[in-house]
Image (cartoon, coloured by chain):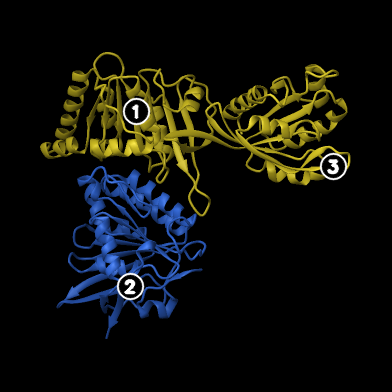
Amino acid sequence: MISTGISGVDDMLGGGIPRGSRVLYSMEPGADGQLFIVSTFLSALERKIPSLVILPNTTVEAFLHDAAAMHGRAIDLSSQTIVFMDAVDRERIQRAGKTAVAREQAWQARIRKVCSEKQVEVIFAYFDLLYEDCGLKKGLTLLVTAIKGPKPTIILEHLNLEGKSLLDRFIREFSFDLVITIQSAFPPIPQFSFFTIAHTSWAKVTKRAIPFIISGGKIVPYIPRIVVTGPAGSGKSSFVTSASDEGHSIDRQGADGDITTVVMDFGNLHGKDFDITLYGTPGHTRFDPLIPSLLHHAMGVVVVIDATKPETFPRARDLIGLMAKQWMPIVIAANKHDLPGAEDEKAIRSSLGVPGDTPFFFISALQKTDTHRVLESMVDRITQFSF
Amino acid sequence: MYSYKTGIPQIDDVCGGFDAGTNILILAPPMSYADILAYALIKPHEGEYAIVLSTNERAAEVVDAFRLSGADKRFIGVIDAITKSSTPTIADTQRLVFVSSPTDLTGIGIKFSNMIETIFEGEFSEGEAGLFPPPIRFCVNSISTLLMYRRLEVLYQFLHVLTAKLKKIEGVGIYLLNSESFDDKTLSMIKQLMNCVIEVKIENNTSYLRVQGIRGVSSEWLKFSVVKGQVTTLP
């Protein structure tokens, strides 16, 4: 396997990219996703996989400078496993070849020579200009036939100005094994970027858009909102606080002396290679009108219940009903299972009316490891869920 | 709807300027000083911003041209597609960003989007007026250069995205194209993306312009000059 260099994506792909695969990072104009191919390139570099990088629209020096700026540190080429063809090579080829056929042949000869000399296993290419110079079929053929012997791994970045029809051609006509599209929203909507695993030939991945941020020179998949809900006093605030790297709770002491959440809990954490934001709802019914707005843009719901208080289960059941209408993944976290009087899973599932395929965890909301187990399951649900 | 003043009375007096979301092609022969006209039309007024995609001169030269016209450089951003080929390690600043070459449409698209985002977030410069949406004048100082490097069909698709984004943010776009270097098909395709065309010509050392595509504005040839970033039409 070759790592994409993006841990969350590797997990979704079952560990990375199988050798011999054809991979396309398809960029929408304006989407800030150049770090995708750079991350994969850096991963190959780190593992000393002999690679050719074709950069027809820039020079090696400019590419390395930009890649270092994106990555946040200098690129170490001392392993001498990487060879480049850049804009200077393209210019020579353009000048030498008087006809399109002659230029294609020059490209082919040069790529084959480099691949043979350096025993290249992976070809990275910024494909736009190869596509323009040679056309789609011939441009791809240059790369596919570059290495004699085992099938080369080909990893392309391409500015897709043609939309879905071009993606279909890559997948159907040219048997690409992995197509990841990178898109972004544009002002006046706040700009955010997202990627979609549009196709894989080896992993069963639900096609869906996943937001990402760039942090510390890395692509970090981002879940903008997981809602934590449940009856009052079930331990939602403890869950959010315990799970979060940082968080806040807006609480007030009730007439009975208990502390209760009156607006919401809020927390951030990094888990399972995702950046995640948690929103905890108040548990009292009088706050129910707030819940739809908290569910807006949510990607999943954790329902926290107190396993020792079966009298609160009908309320939890109502909340689950409310969530189910939103059609999003749900995970049940049964808190305080270590205390006397805790109900068993079968009884709780029955009372809540949740089916057997809904993930269920006994937890102590005070234990970070427990809350993280729940959220890891939630991330898996989110990345596989058909929204 | 916001109107972008042009300084040309024949436009401003009739309709208050360019409507937000207008994309304008300046079609001009070489050495007609059309770039000076383009820069005058995108010189930012108070509360506005200007972004230049420079495919034929360095960012420093663009900024200098605006400085000479009396524009406040704090509100001018440049996407420079020239400098990096000779200075590969040049680093971006808040308002001056660099792409490897005019062939790099991916880089141009990203830098354009990021600069727009910075403006919308109010982080572009000090002393921002806070108008929303922020009025942005955008200029490609030569589509001709882009056409030298990329196929017409590719560039058409790319400009289609760019002009649509300008419309969405209610900006105004000015695109310079050499009228003598390209065939009718090319001119016709590029015109399809525009709302308005300003033609420029020079006769007997006098510059003329004529505006087509703005309702109520005469399409007669007008003598004009540009002094310190101000367009003046002459009798």
Q: CA distance from mark 1 to mark 2?
A: 50 Å
Whether residue B149 is situated above or below residue B171 in the rendered picture: above
Name the tint of chain A in the rendering: yellow
Q: Are marks 2 and 3 on the same chain?
A: no
Q: Is residue B229 visible?
A: yes
For mark 1, give the secondary structure. Answer: helix
Badge 1: how crowded within 10 Å, few (<14), some, or many (20+)? many
| Residue A108 numbered tag | none
Q: Which chain gets the blue colouring?
A: B
**Quadrant the N terminus of chain A occupies:** top left
Q: Are marks 2 and 3 in contact (CB under 8 Å)?
A: no
In the rendered image, residue A302, in percent from the top left (x then y), is placed at: 70, 31
In the rendered image, residue A15, in percent from the top left (x then y), is placed at: 47, 19
For mark 3, give the secondary structure. Answer: loop
On screen, residue B112 versus residue A280, left or right, reads left
Q: Residue at x 45, y 34 (%)?
A: A219
Type of the residue with mark 3: Gly
Q: CA distance from mark 2 to mark 3?
A: 71 Å
Q: Mark 1 — residue?
A: A41
Earlier in the chain: of badge 1 and badge 3, it is 1
Q: Residue at x 48, y 50 (%)?
A: A186
Residue in front for this viewpoint, A159 or A370: A370
In the rendered image, residue B138, in percent from the top left (x then y), is placed at: 37, 60
Q: Chain of mark 1?
A: A
Of circles 1 and 3, the one toward us is: 3
For mark 2, give the secondary structure. Answer: strand
Of circles 2 and 3, the one toward us is: 3
Q: Chain of mark 2?
A: B
